[in-house]
């Protein structure tokens, strides 16, 4: 039995809408909707308000005699990765005049670690390398 062209076209359009994330709306026979069947969603749209702009720090002429913090942002929250430790060893071998301090940020990459930022400021960290690596 050959499908009717109109029915095939409607099915094709419905399939395209569903695959693109737009579900076709079906008329409801019941106008009363149960409260327990409602779903609350959050709007993921980006706000139109821009974040406050903070100027970049001026570039250092040299790292000699400076303190550089190597901060692992703990991207996966698994306790750090060896990349920053390797960078610290590299500084010790190749630039012994640079004090390289390795720190693992608390929490994961989206959580703030104000204690760490205060420590860097209090120890007069001249530079920081923030990284995620695996």
Image (cartoon, helix red, strand yellow):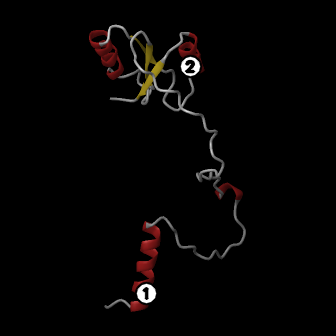
Name the residue located 52 percent from the left edge and 69 percent from the top edge.
Answer: 23
- Report the disc number at residue 7: 1
Of circles 1 and 2, the one toward us is: 2
Q: Is residue 63 left or right of residue 108?
A: left
Residue 120 — which label?
A: none
Residue 107 vertical position relative to residue 43 in the rendered view, above or below: above
Residue 67 drawn at (x, y percent): 45, 12
User: Mark 2 — residue?
Assistant: 117
Q: Nearer the viewer, residue 27 or 75?
A: 75
Q: Vertical placement of 35 versus 84: above or below?
A: below
Determine whether, in the image, residue 84 is placed left or right of residue 44.
left
In x, y percent, where is residue 66? 44, 12
* Quadrant of the drawing holding the N terminus: bottom left
- Give neighbour class at mark 2: few <14, some 14-19, many 20+ (Cα, 10 Å): few
Give how far across and how far down residue 127 sits, in percent: 47, 20
Q: Position of residue 111 (x, y in %)?
A: 55, 29
Give the image quarter of residue 25: bottom right
Residue 37: which quarter of the image? bottom right
Q: Front-most of 101 and 20? A: 101
Q: Look at the numbered disc 1 and give the secondary structure of its residue.
A: helix
């Amino acid at each position: 039995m050959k499908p009717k062209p109109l029915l095939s076209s409607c099915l094709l359009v419905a399939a395209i809408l569903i695959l693109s994330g737009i579900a076709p709306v079906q008329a409801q026979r019941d106008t009363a909707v149960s409260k327990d069947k409602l779903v609350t969603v959050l709007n993921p749209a980006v706000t139109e308000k821009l974040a406050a702009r903070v100027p970049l720090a001026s570039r250092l002429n040299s790292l000699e005699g400076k303190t550089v913090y190597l901060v692992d942002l703990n991207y996966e929250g698994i306790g750090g990765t060896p990349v920053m430790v390797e960078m610290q060893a590299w500084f010790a071998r190749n630039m012994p005049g640079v004090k390289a301090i390795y720190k693992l940020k608390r929490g994961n990459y989206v959580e703030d670690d104000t204690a760490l930022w205060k420590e860097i400021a209090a120890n007069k960290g001249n530079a920081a390398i923030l990284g995620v690596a695996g």
